[in-house]
Amino acid sequence: MAMEAPAAPHNAGDLELTVTSPDQMRELGRRLAKLLRAGDLLMLSGELGAGKTTLTRGLGEGMGVRGAVTSPTFVIARVHPSLGDGPPLVHVDAYRLSGGLDEMEDLDLDVSLPESVIVVEWGEGKVEELTEERLQVVIHRAVGDTTDEVRHVTVTGLGERWAAVDLSVLSA
């Protein structure tokens, strides 16, 4: 696998990776799933087509949840129950939500968070108030070059939950 981590991340909480294909993005999701537990919130950011849903598809595969993970753009949120004894995956697409946490409250994410893993695409300015402990994943692609599959992924752990987690295992 050609995922590479730089020698010196920007700070102790950041991990930067280069992903060169959708398959590698799914594999990153599968690796990330091994680090997750009930109560975790992931915020995914990136341009349209950057790979947020592909990463989440890998998370679902790694977590062993039921149902195909697809973009929940038109339903806003989908719950994928675990096929085993793990937590369900709640996949939220906040792209069409213009308000902040007030509009998100209708989704009852605060109720679901303790027993679920919640992944929110386009959650900036909308879900930060749910918890100070979250994993932020920012995916950048070459804008305008639709043939370029290279993505630069920055994973940042915030809060005590992520302070002791070794994110470098994602680049192994």
Image (cartoon, rainbow, N blue to C red):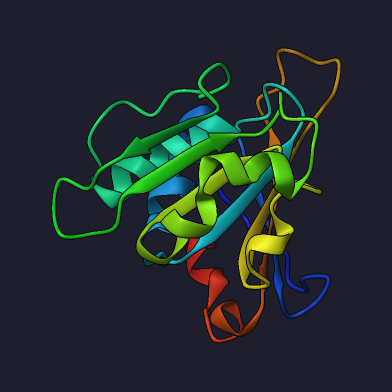
Q: Position of residue 157 (x, y in %)?
A: 65, 70
The answer to whether residue 59 is seen in the rendering is no
Please tell me in which quadrant of the rendered image residue 167 appears: bottom right
Which one is in front, 138 or 107? Answer: 107
The image position of residue 27, as x and y in percent, is 42, 44
Q: Residue at x 79, y 37 (%)?
A: 99
What's the residue at 61%, 84% (across, down)?
163
Q: Name above or below for residue 79 compared with residue 165.
A: above
Q: How many marks?
A: 0
Residue 101, relative to residue 91: is it above or below? below
Percent coordinates x, y for residue 117 in the rendering: 42, 56
Classify residue 95 as left or right of residue 10.
Answer: left
Residue at 31% x, 26% y is: 68
On the picture, is 30 further left or further right than 154?
Answer: left
Residue 151: quadrant of the picture: top right
Classify 150 as above or below 161. Answer: above
